[in-house]
Every structure is written in C-alpha cells, then in structure tokens.
Amino acid sequence: MKLVVMKFGGTSVEDASAIRRTADIVAGRVAHGLQPVVIVSAMARVTDQLLNAAAAAGRGDKSSALAASVALRARHHQAASELIPAGELAPISAFIDEHFDALDELLRGLAAVGEVTPRTTDIVASYGERLSSRIVTAAFLACGIAASHLDARDCIITDAQHMKAIPQDELIAERLREHVLPLAQAGRVAVLGGFIGSTPEGVTTTLGRGGSDFSAALVGGGLHAESIEIWTDVNGIMTTDPRICPDALRVRTISFDEASELAYFGAKVLHPATILPAVEKNIPVLVLNSRDAQNEGTRITALAPHCRSPFKSIAAKKRLTIIDIVANRMLMAHGYLKAVFEVFDRHKCPVDMVSTSEVSVSLTVDSNERLPEIAADLRKFADVKYEGRKALICMVGENIRGQNGIAAQVFGALRHINLRMISQGASEINMSFMIEEDDVEEAIRSLHSVFFADPDPSIFDLEARAEAQAAGGKR
Ligand code: ADP
Ligand code: ASP
Ligand code: MG
C-alpha cells in the first residue's frame, strides 16, 4: 500500500467549487493506485471568525458573537447543499445544526461569564475543522470516492498546553494504527480535520495557528507514509511571499533544513513544526497548488541539490520587539548572560536573535504581553529599553557558506534601510537582520531583485516568470 497524506489548507476547501477541485485531486491519486489519507483545514477565514466570536463573547458582547455564528452556519449549509445531493443532505444538515447549536450555547455561556480561557478558546476554534472535515467527507462520497470521516481528536493526542499543544508521538502512532490504518487497508480514504487534538483525557486542544500542516506531518510520520502533500493556494515554496513580490519564483527543490528555517522565520506557507516528523522518518514533503494541480510544486528532501544561487528564499517575521539590555554594574561579569536568559526562561519567552557587545545585550522576541514583567525583572540588574513594531528578514540557502561578498551585496541592496541587528545563524544557512516593520515590503523587493535576477534554472522555475513577462508584453 502506497500511503500518501494529503493536506488541504483553508483556501482549498473554502467553498463548494474549491472542495470539488480537492475531490478531483484526491480521486486522481486514487486512480494512480495511491492510498490517500486526507487532512483538511477549516474553510478559509473560519478560524479567525471563530476566534473573534470567542473574544467578543469574552467581552460580554453576546450579540456580535452570535451574529458571527449565524453567518458561519449559513456558509457551511450553503457549501453542503451545493455539494451533496438533496437525498443525502439530511444527516449533514443535522450535523451542521447540532454543532452550531452547541457552539451558540457555549458562546452564550462565555458571554454570561464574560471570560474566555485558552481551554474554551480551543473548543470554539475546533468547530472549523470539525465541520469542514465532515462536509468534505460527504462531498468525496458524492463524487464517488470511498471516504470515511474520523474525528481527529481521537488520533492527535497532545498535552494540555491549550492553543499550542505538544503532540504525544507514541500515543498518536498507536491511535493512527487503531483508527486510520484499518480504513486505509480497506481502501477507504480517511478524512480528518487538521489543527485539532485532545488530551488523553479527551479535552479538546489545538496545535497553534496554521497547525493543520503539523497534523499532516504527524499523521504522515505516524503511518510511515510514502509522502506528505501540502496543498495550498500558491505553486509551492516561492523565493519570497508572492503577495509581497509578484515576481517570486517557485523553488523546485529545497532541503528540510532550509524549509524549516524559512517556516520558523515567518514563511506562512508551512507551519514551523511541520518538517520535523517528516525528517525523522525521511518522508519527502511536497507543497502543491490546489488551483493548478498539474504544477509540480516544491519538493522538500533530506539533502539540498547543488544550486549556484546563494539563497533559496527570503522570509519575514513581523510583530517583533527588540530589547536592549545594558549592564549597569557587572559589566558582563561572569554569569551575567546566564542571569539575562534565566529571566526569559522564567517567563517562558523564546528569544529569536541575540547580539552582544562588551556592555550590552540586544535580543529580539515575539511581541508578548509579558514584556513589562520581563523588563521589570531585568531592571533588577541592568538598564533596559524595548521597542516594538520590528521585523526580522531571514534569507535562507545552504549555499551561503563559503561564498564571498554576499554580506556586501545584501547591505548594498538595503542601503536605504535602517538595519538594527544582523546575524548569520550558527546553522550557516541563514542570514538575518532586524528592520522597522514598515520597511519589510521595500526590503524584500530590493533583496529579491538583487539575488533572484539571474537564478539557477535547475532550482527555480523560470518558465512561469518568462510566461508572465510575455503575457505582460502582449497587453
Ligand atoms: P493554507 O491555508 O493552504 O495553509 P496559508 O495561507 O497558510 O495557506 O499559506 C499560503 C500562503 O503563504 C501563500 O498564499 C503566500 O501568500 C504565503 N507565503 C509566505 N511566504 C511564502 C513563500 N516563501 N512561498 C510561498 N508562499 C508563501
Ligand atoms: N484553521 C487553522 C488556522 O487557520 C489551522 C490551519 O488552517 O492550518 O490557523
Ligand atoms: Mg497554513
């Protein structure tokens, strides 16, 4: 059995026509003798709307919370009624209504108490994937695919860190063998919602925003799949976010290390935790476009093939804060850095980038509501200043090492931009620097035009650029 895990993001299930395209793609894999296991996100923007509804309820604004739920209920019914023949619609309609009735009851409760906790937030957020996975299963059946719906919470077992739960790999592998494997062996396509899980006691959790990619990798890893396919709305991993730079090129092949570095430093196309379960089992990951299923996408593999261009891609992470810590007494005495990092550790605040001089340490963190407490603790032994609205630009490529003059080219491209901190990571495959958030778009476009003017055609898809230029020329 050639098992392939196929994950479809929000835009690939956003409405009836997207779900039909998804069904065609899955049917194509089945026709080629593969055995898909399908993971779906919530329909596009649904998670945002659910989280907004939870927040409104927490503020006591019951009417906004319920209004959001009314709109979502209608959208799910609409998709279901367009996809499923009238004679088979009743059980799906009942499923949708039961779920929205329960959601409304929860939102009323939260509004009455005027409080949401991470635990209740997870319950509200989970409805998106619980509903989309059920509707997609019914749509697959209507298209003649032998599909079975599974509640992902029976398989993806996590700890109780709500909104960013940590998966428990062994329990997951056991549950997958129990619930998913028998379906696959019987030739049925199991359909599960991504993003959601539960504790061993059955309390609903989520894996963090964008977590359906992570679910796919967990299922692929747990079942030793042949490959994991991440279906999204772009042609693959691109040389930068195509929304910022329409000139971005598809990267044909990228290494696990490069892809995880990019994901960690902000390339939204993959969740940062996606790669690890695949790396551990050496399972190739493909990023593909559900709107252009013939496009060969990006293949993520253990080793990077030779590439003459220094960088593969440029990512940006916004909403960061720079903290400058100046020693007021000890002047970098022995144990000083340890004391600094202990403060971040105590507040469970991860640090992205660090630079030190004789008397000061500068570091960057995700903007975080605990900053005043962190600063207060640091001020016990240092002068502290912090400034938000910063962004990190991260340029990734296995080829940076050993190439002379790259830093000079980077600084040349960014002459007009104020660089705050610079680092070439210990991994030697990334070069990063901090800038003002407002400068991100400009910086990325400048860097892209310098470093992808003459890219290596064996690694980057230049045909799409040539076609676009030809089309532009004809207009
Ligand atoms: P999905 O809902 O399918 O998970 P996401 O919105 O999470 O999709 O991720 C896809 C988006 O990631 C793209 O539409 C694109 O704007 C953005 N993106 C950011 N960086 C990159 C990159 N380097 N390559 C491709 N897409 C990127
Ligand atoms: N629906 C979730 C989110 O929007 C998970 C995902 O789409 O990957 O964050
Ligand atoms: Mg995503």
Image: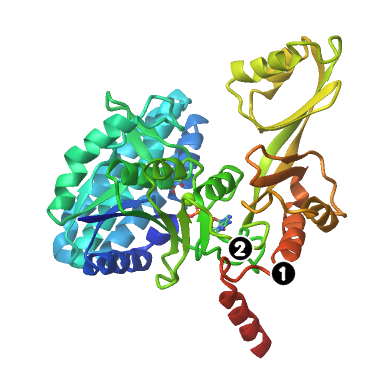
Is 232 situated above or below 275?
A: below
Label drawn at residue 385: none
Q: Nearer the viewer, residue 447 or 83?
A: 447
Q: Dividing the picture into quarters, in which one does residue 106 lie?
A: top left
Q: Nearer the viewer, residue 335 or 206?
A: 335
**At numbered mark 1, what does the secondary structure look like: helix, strand or loop?**
loop
Q: Is residue 475 visible?
A: no
- For disc 1, the neighbor class at 10 Å (few under 14, some 14 to 19, many from 20) is few
- The number of discs equals 2
Tag 1 residue:
453
Q: Residue at x 38, y 28 (%)?
A: 109
Quarter the C terminus occupies: bottom right
| Disc 2 C-beta below 8 A from ligand 1 | yes
First reached walking from the N terminus: tag 2 or tag 1: 2
Percent x, y for residue 23? 29, 65
Percent x, y for residue 222? 30, 40
How did the renderer colour the structure? rainbow
Tag 2 residue:
242
- For disc 2, the neighbor class at 10 Å (few under 14, some 14 to 19, many from 20) is some
Instruction: Evaluate if marks 2 and 1 touch, with contact meaning CB atoms under 8 Å apart.
Output: no
Percent x, y for residue 271? 49, 45
Q: Amino acid at mark 2?
A: Pro
Q: Dividing the picture into quarters, in which one does residue 19 lie?
A: bottom left
Is 190 situated above or below 116?
A: below
**At numbered mark 2, what does the secondary structure look like: helix, strand or loop?**
loop
Q: Is 417 on the left or on the right of 280, as rendered?
A: right
| Disc 1 C-beta below 8 A from ligand 1 | no
Separation of marks 2 and 1 at Cα, in angstroms: 16 Å
- Residue furthest to the front: 402
Percent x, y for residue 246? 64, 67
Q: Residue at x 37, y 32 (%)?
A: 167
